[in-house]
Image (cartoon, grey):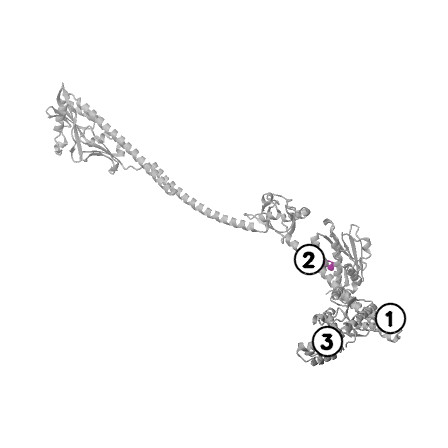
Amino acid sequence: MGSPATHIVDDDPAVRDALQWLLKSRSVQSQVWGSAEAFLASASCELCGCLLLDVRMPGMSGIELFDRLRALNCRLPVIFLTGHGDVPMAVQALKDGAFDFIEKPYDDNALVDKVLAALEHDTKRCIREKSLREVQHRLEQLTQREQEVMHQILAGKLNKVIADELGIAMRTVEVHRSHIFEKMQVRSAVELSQVLGLLGNQSGPES
Amino acid sequence: MAFILFIGGVALLLWMSDRADKEERRATLISDILWLEQNLRFHLTRNEELLGRIDLAQTADAKTFESFARTLFGFESGLRQLIWLDAEGQARRAHPATMDSAVAGETTEVSPSRQSFRLARSLGKPVYSSAYPFFTDDWQFEVHVPVSREGRVVGVMVGVYRIREILGDSVPWWLAERYRISIVGNSGKVLGTRSKIESAVTDEGYQVAFDPPGWGLTIHAVPYHAPRPLASVLLSASLVILALIVLWSLWILRRHVLRRQAVEEQLQREYAFRKAMEDSLDTGMRARNLDGEIIYVNPAFCRMVGWSAAELIGRRPPMPYWADDYLDETRAMHDRVLAGQGPEEGFELKLKRRSGEVIDVLIHEAPLIDAQGRHSGWMGSMVDITERKHADEQARQQQDRLQSTARLVAMGEMASSIAHELNQPLAAISSYCTGAANLLRNQVPTDEVLPALDKAVEQARRAGQVIRRIYSLARPGESRFEVVDLAERVEAALSLMDGEIRQKGIHVLLALSPAATVEGDPVLLEQALFNLLRNAIESMRDTAPEQRQLAVALTCAEGYARLAIVDRGYGIAPDVAGQLFDPLFTTKPEGMGMGLAICRSVVENHRGRLSFEANPQGGTVFHVLLPLVPQWVAPPRT
């Protein structure tokens, strides 16, 4: 997956089909799901795009699915399709971080516009999250010693000082440094700190 | 104690009466005996004088002496012999001449006594000798009277008395009847007795000295044991009998009093028990006599109506606790009860408390039967059911509200589900069409657009099916049609609202033709009738109570059953008349606007007509016209 796509979750096949047709008429590719459970089974945190979600469904309801996704830290934008009387529920969902809701019967092209807005919003998020995941991946490839050395480098210390502090040979420090640069796909200590700074901004509280 | 005192008193009285009697007898005895003694003394003294007057010449001649003696004896003097002794004491004359004693020689002393003679001669005064026996059972004594001549005693005249003779002569018969009189010598020997009966009470005797003879003679009088006078005995006996009777009656009285006390105590206990029971009753009790006058009320009744028993007893109708608004009804019921036609199962009535508050009571009347078994009035028991009625009413209203709410919720739920059902295909249609339009704007070939339009048509059909399903749900099929008796249905619908009709005090006038049979669904028809009747009743909510009248007339004419429901309610404003049968149109705050719409659809479904007009007297008239079952096709009833 990974490619941005619109996901439609509705229990009514006609509605699903009609929505897919509508989006396609505006060149938006979409994928349909017959129930919340089916979507949840194949969903991952790496999904990009947006989710058109019917509030009222047999089995797991749209609101429930939304809560599950939030619990999984999935920030896929969600547009709720609500019937008459479901508005308060949708407003609450909006406060909890849903992207938007649209009440049936809806203006179809306005719906498509909202989907497009959500997709655009999610593209930025996807790129950022993707690079973060990349940095994270690279960091995970460093050995314990390399991580220690990397922290010393980021602190701006010279190789000599690092060798002294860690009680290793100067030559060894240089080997570690080259491995770190290679694994982190950077050419200088400045670049390294930029890459890691991105990570720090994004997930500061975690480190 | 009183008993003992009484006995003692009677005994004392008897004893005292006896004693007084005895004393009186003794006093009589004493006076009698003194009289006797005096009498005897008088006799003896007179004899002394007579003896002293003897003439010497008479002594000389035997014949004159004899006549003198005879004269003396004739005076009842008690003398038995006269002897003339000369100065030397020689007996010169004697009459009678010879003494038996001398002949018999049984006298112990010389007669006449020498000693007495000498004493009489020397003293010159009469001297009595001591008594001496004469024969075996008689005693006699002598009196020696000296006779003087010129200062010289010339002789002594001796009179011999015989004691028995004295007693016989000088004791009168009446005395002898009462006493045994005896003369007793100084040795206690009885010298002579005059008595008729031997037995006498010795201890009651009395004695006096028999003095002129002296020598220690005494007169003894002993009363006979005379039978007590009958009157006295009768008196005593009657006294005793009376006392016994008094005692007996006292005992009877005491027994009676005790029994009475026990009965009274029991009565009091019974009374206290009844009173406690009566006071603890929550049920008001009120008794009236046959004229309707109150003769009894219990405390619970007083509490119920707020008037005291003193204020109520003796009152005649109209009673102060009759509710003003229901005066006629109450009076009618009162008369019915007094006529003995009160409902046996009891009846409900509104009464007024003193504070003006109106209360509901349930009354049961029962005939009051007095001790002689006569019907003397009516006893009514009353239970205050105000609270209960109030609670019932509240529960009913609550029920109504709940039902109404439940209906609303159900309807809302149904509407919501219908909306969803319809929204789905509509949304799909909209999306297909919009998508198709989008494509067409971009000059996409038609055959790419067509499938979407086909799908849109399919969805439109789906929506139509939803609607058809709802319609068939709301309109049951005609298979349940059967022959319906409209009058029966009207009555059934009215009975469902019995409580409300009674509570609002609505007067219902029914004129139902039994021939009104139509073909239809009985449940639906009843529902329609129920709605119409309910509207009529509710419309009279603000009508004055006496004008609350609901008239239902069912007639048959020209192949139609014609039902007119006439109310006196607030009527229908001209500006809403046109919308009246529209669904969801209502004039009632909690109404749903379905009632009349349902009515019209049901009536029209039965090939009938529903219309209304204003009631000229105020209110509305609803007309229901339904085709009658043609007689020739009417299926036989089963």
Q: Dot 2 corresponds to which residue?
A: B398
Element under label 1?
helix
Element under label 3?
helix
> For this rendering, which residue is in front, B359 or A57?
A57
N-terminal-most mark, 2 or 1: 2
Q: Amino acid at mark 2?
A: Gln
- The lab-note entry on whether marks 2 and 1 share a chain reads yes
> For this rendering, which residue is in front, B556 or B498?
B498
Residue A207 x, y percent position in the rendering: 70, 72
Q: Up-down: is B103 above or below B635?
A: above
Main SS of residues in magenta: helix
Residue A36 x, y percent position in the rendering: 74, 72
Q: Which residues are magenta?
A: B487-492
Mark whose residue sits in front, 1 or 3: 3
Mark whose residue sits in front, 2 or 1: 1
Residue at 86% in and 75% down: B448
Q: Chain of mark 3?
A: A
Badge 1 vs badge 3, beta-carbon distance below 8 Å: no
Residue A154 x, y percent position in the rendering: 72, 74
Sort mark 1 into few (<14), some (14-19) or many (20+) by Cα contacts within 10 Å. some
Mark whose residue sits in front, 3 or 2: 3
Sort mark 3 into few (<14), some (14-19) or many (20+) by Cα contacts within 10 Å. some
